[in-house]
Image (spheres, helix red, strand yellow):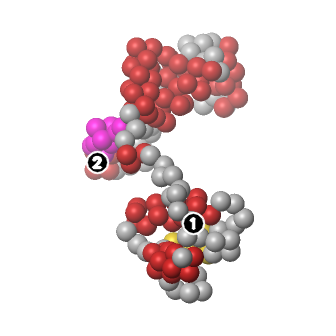
Amino acid sequence: MPSRSSLATAAWKQPNFLASMRYVVRLSHLSEADKRAYVLADNKLAEKAGWDRELLAIELQGLIELDVDVELTGFDMAEIDLLFGHVREANSASGPKDKVPEPSLGPAVSQTGDLWLLGSHRLLCGDGDPTYVDVAVRRWQAYTGQAAILAGSGETFETTAERRAKAAA
C-alpha cells in the first residue's frame, strides 16, 4: 500500500488523481453472515445519508477559494451552483424564529453581579449592558420552557422583574 506522503504527492502532481481513486473496504475478517449484514447496513446508510447543505456549501466555497477543482469531489458545477442558490435563499428567508429579540425599552431586570441559573448553565451579569442579559434569559426560558432562577434569592426571573419594577416606582 502506498504511503500517505506518496498519495499526497501523486494527488498534487496529477490533478485527476483524486477523482480516479477507488476505496476498498476489506471484509475478509468477517464471517459470511457478517459480510451479508455489512452489505445491507452499508446500503441502508447510503439510503439514509444526507447533507447539511449549509455546511456543504461552506466547505465547497472554501475549496473554491483555495483554487481546488471542486469537481474532483464528485459534485459538478451545476449541482454546486444550485446548492449555493438554495443556501442563499434559505439564509435570506428569515422568519420570526430567526429574529434576535431587542432589549426592552423599559429598565433592565438584571443588575451587575446577578447570577442567573439557567438549568445546568450560569449567566453572570457583568459591567456591560444588562438588557442583553435579560434578552439571553428570556430566550433561554422561551427555548427550554423552564424558569431562570436568581442565585442567592431563589426568585424566578419574572418575580425578580416584578419586585425590581415596584422598587423603582
Q: Is the magenta region chiefly helix, strand or loop?
A: helix
33 vs 39: above or below: below
**What's under tag 1, amino acid-wise?**
Ala
Any part of residue 48 in sight: yes
149 vs 75: above or below: below
In the picture provided, is 146 more to the left or to the right than 153?
left
3D distance between C-alphas at marks 1 and 2: 60 Å
Mark 1 vs 2, N-terminal side: 2
Which quadrant holds the C terminus?
A: bottom right
42 vs 108: above or below: above
User: Does the magenta segment cover residue 48?
Assistant: yes
Which of 76/148 is in front? 148
Q: Position of residue 159 (x, y in %)?
A: 46, 80
Which mark is drawn over residue 108?
Answer: 1
Q: Residue at x 60, y 86 (%)?
A: 152
Q: Residue at x 44, y 33 (%)?
A: 91
Which of 68/142 is in front? 142
In the picture provided, is 161 more to the left or to the right than 11?
left
Which mark is drawn over residue 13?
Answer: none
**What's under tag 2, amino acid-wise?**
Ala
Element assignment for label 1:
loop
Which mark is drawn over residue 37?
Answer: 2
Which of 20/93 is in front? 93
In the picture provided, is 110 more to the left or to the right than 36?
right
Which quadrant holds the N terminus?
A: top right
Query: Quarter-wise, where is residue 10 in the image?
Result: top right
- Crowd rating for badge 1 (residues with CA inside 10 Å; few <14, some 14–19, many 20+): some
Q: Which residues are magenta?
A: 39-51
Q: Position of residue 89 (x, y in %)?
A: 39, 27
Q: Residue at x 62, y 64 (%)?
A: 130
Q: Residue at x 69, y 21 (%)?
A: 9
Q: Position of residue 52 (x, y in %)?
A: 42, 38
